[in-house]
Amino acid sequence: MLKPSASTHTYLRWVGGKHRLISRLRSYVPRDYSNRTYHEPFLGAASLFLELQPEHAYLSDLNEALIRSFEYVRERPDLVARYLGEHQSRDSETYYYAIRQKYNYFKTFSCAQAARFIYLNRTCYNGVFRVNQQGRFNVPYGRRTRLLFPKRTHLTKVSQALQNVVLRSLPYQKALEDAKEGDFVYLDPPYPPLNGTSQFRHYTAHRFNLSDQQHLARLALELRDRGCLVMISNADVPSIRKLYDGMCITRLQVTRSVTCKNVKHSVSELIITTYNANEMLGHSPNGGRRR
């Protein structure tokens, strides 16, 4: 059994987020993770971190706005929640575009900007965070019939989980320079297209491509040789299986929105580990099939 934690869920909607997969994903985490330093360089919504809440963690993402929002939630969850409440009470399509314009105008972060980031994330189309080549957020209004915003108590729990965490906006290569023998590393990069054309990887102005996937696979091997335990989530496509051939690969069936029309499909995803999860956990993880 894994050590229980005071877990909480993310306050963000994030394409490719692992909120709905947490119980299955956690089955592959080393049972002694709480005794290890945790690294997550593709942080996204931070679902796995918030579930595990390890004592020592390095969290990073190339998306600076995302990291800055976590920083301000950590420091002033009460004030961010107050601003969010104001946005929620005034929400409309016209208001959304006014806030989007204001969000793109301000170059420095603050509690107010963090609240704008969360408001746009909760009300935009399909929870997408997409920026153009100039780094400007350009997702249209979502016209959701039911809006759910994180309350002060929720943000306070996230703040508490982040108190002893190192948060940084860095490329994953730089972020993992700190990883050392015995550390646990979770990699959840932007996925390659499932059908050769459809994909989403516009979290920053940089587009994560096949060359990036190849470099990441080489880095995973380097981390393994360094003595780290590495777990990777990725798409179940031939190119990814080839890159990680020789590691422990498990296939999961998941439900995803894989088109811009928000149509739900059952697709395969992979959990890849540099260690034998069955041996480390002392049982067979649920919900997955080898290879």
Image (cartoon, rainbow, N blue to C red):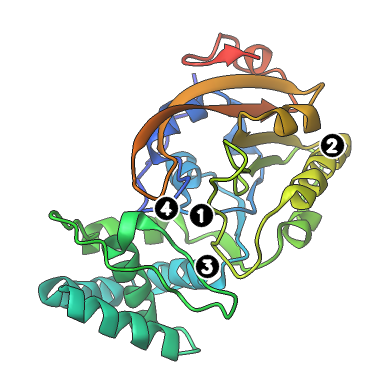
Q: Amino acid at mark 4?
A: Trp
251 left or right of 241 in image:
left
Question: Which of the marked residues, 4 or 1, is nearer the chain's N terminus?
Answer: 4
Give above or below for 111 relative to 131.
below
In x, y percent, where is residue 86? Answer: 16, 78
Question: Which of the marked residues, 2 or 3, is nearer the chain's N terminus?
Answer: 3
- Residue denoted by label 1: 44
Q: CA distance from mark 2 to mark 3?
A: 27 Å
- Residue denoted by label 4: 14
Disc 2, SS: helix
265 left or right of 288 in image:
left
Q: Amino acid at mark 3?
A: Ile
Question: Which of the marked residues, 4 or 3, is nearer the chain's N terminus?
Answer: 4
For the residues labelled 4 and 1, say whether their Cβ atoms are less than 8 Å apart.
yes
Q: Amino acid at mark 1?
A: Gly
For the residues labelled 4 and 2, say whether their Cβ atoms are less than 8 Å apart.
no
- Residue denoted by label 2: 221
Question: Which of the marked residues, 3 or 1, is nearer the chain's N terminus?
Answer: 1
Give above or below for 129 relative to 219.
below
In x, y percent, where is residue 221? Answer: 84, 37
94 or 47, which lies in front?
Answer: 94
206 left or right of 144 in image:
right
Q: Amino acid at mark 2?
A: Leu
Q: CA distance from mark 1 to mark 2?
A: 23 Å
Give above or below for 209 relative to 290.
below
Disc 3, SS: helix
